Image (tube, helix red, strand yellow):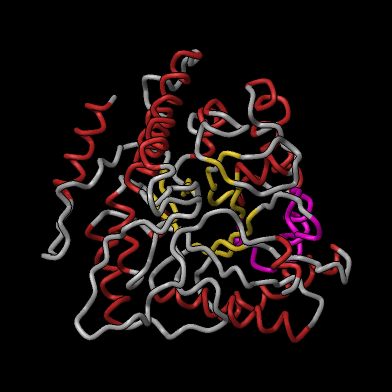
Amino acid sequence: MEQQQQEGNARHKGKTKVNHAAIDTSDFLPRAETPWKVGAHVSAAGGVENAVVNAASIGANAFALFVKSQRKWTSPPMKDESVREFKKRMKDFGYTSRMVLPHGSYLLNLANPDEDKREKSYECFLDDLKRCEALGLELYNFHPGSTVGATTTEASLGHIADCINRAHKETTVITTVLENMAGAGNIIGGNFAHLAGIIERVEDKSRVGICLDTCHSFAAGYDIHTKEGWNLTSFIFSVTKFEEEVGLKYLRAMHLNDSKTPCNSRKDRHENIGLGHLGLQAFHHVLTNPRTQNIPLILETPTFDNNRAVWGTEIAVLNRLSGSSIRGKVADDVVFDDLTTELKSAIKSVEGKKGGGTRSKAKKIVTKRKGDGNENENDADEEGDSTDDAELEKK
């Protein structure tokens, strides 16, 4: 399988024409040729164009990014040169717009009953969407929001849909992708009925979709960590429920995260693939299901200051799970044990080292233009655990 990956990467490199002298691709990890497009939420520090290179360097076939600071209400506009370079690198490295999943600001709360606060969120939301369209992207993923304990769920679903409808009229092609949540407190999106309620109210249903997060689903009570649970009450069950309540046609992306907490914990705590309560088998089910082909499958797991060691290994393992050596067969415990050991080894090699932590601030590939300051940099880098529920409740 490793040989197949290397051969696939060689074919990919043969098709890629990278004319940037500052970018050395010689040590980039291989990108597998597979219909399951696994990647990660990478840094866009130094300019959005750097996210493309950061994704390619870890062998990602898809990626997520923040198109501006996720913790500020306003950010400087993107520079024309940065936008042009982003588009060029997308082409150079062979990424299509449908394999990029920008993530929305942590500050957004389109469900807020306070009209002034909701309008502030809307302006930030619309700015994100326009940035995505300027970059030639088609998807935009965001958290639905919270009732803040001051209104009903039904009213909040209406507020979210109203904002989406307004934004669709002020943009042209972007698809707004709602994320399912872990079900904590007053947070919207902990069950599919919430998502269905929003979509029902959206006027242009061709421009709305869903991103399913494995950790959020598990924390919200969808038991997907065993084969029996998967078949009866999890993804296949969830797909059935999803199709009944929302519609499978709305599935646009997934976030692949293990969970530090048990099923139905209502806590959003991301763990590395195979090392949490979900286990590697759950991801084998995802990566052998044809319904998850050709959509972004994005890791938001801890990297302990080393994207290459952790995400590079996780991506390689997930690609092997989707490979012909396992697909269509009953993978035995030995296979999962071996792959889990590989993942544990990668984590152990970087965890606890100086500067390590649960949120990645790894060394990134950054190419900066002479004279640039930090205008296009994000305050933080990759996506980790979701924004604190209590923080959102105040928005």
- Farthest-out residue, front: 354
182 sits left or right of 381 in the view: right
- Viewer-proximal residue, 138 or 194? 194
* Quarter where residue 341 is shown: top left
Task: Report the residue at 54% width, 51% height from top.
Answer: 252
For the point 31% across and 47% down, the residue is 58
Q: Is residue 85 magenta?
A: no
308 shown above or below 44: above
- Specify whether residue 132 is in view: no
**Residue stretch in magenta:** 185-209
- Left or right: where 87 falls relative to 283: left
Please determine whether, in this image, residue 7 is positioned above or below residue 60: above
Check the picture and name the quadrant holding the C terminus: bottom right
What residue appears at the point 40 percent right and 76 percent down from the top-left corner? 134
Q: Is residue 394 left or right of residue 291?
A: right
Considering the image in quadrants, where does the N terminus appear?
top left
Q: Is residue 1 visible?
A: yes
Q: Is residue 94 above or below residue 369?
A: above
Residue 282: x percent and y percent? Answer: 57, 30
Is 300 in front, or is 34?
300
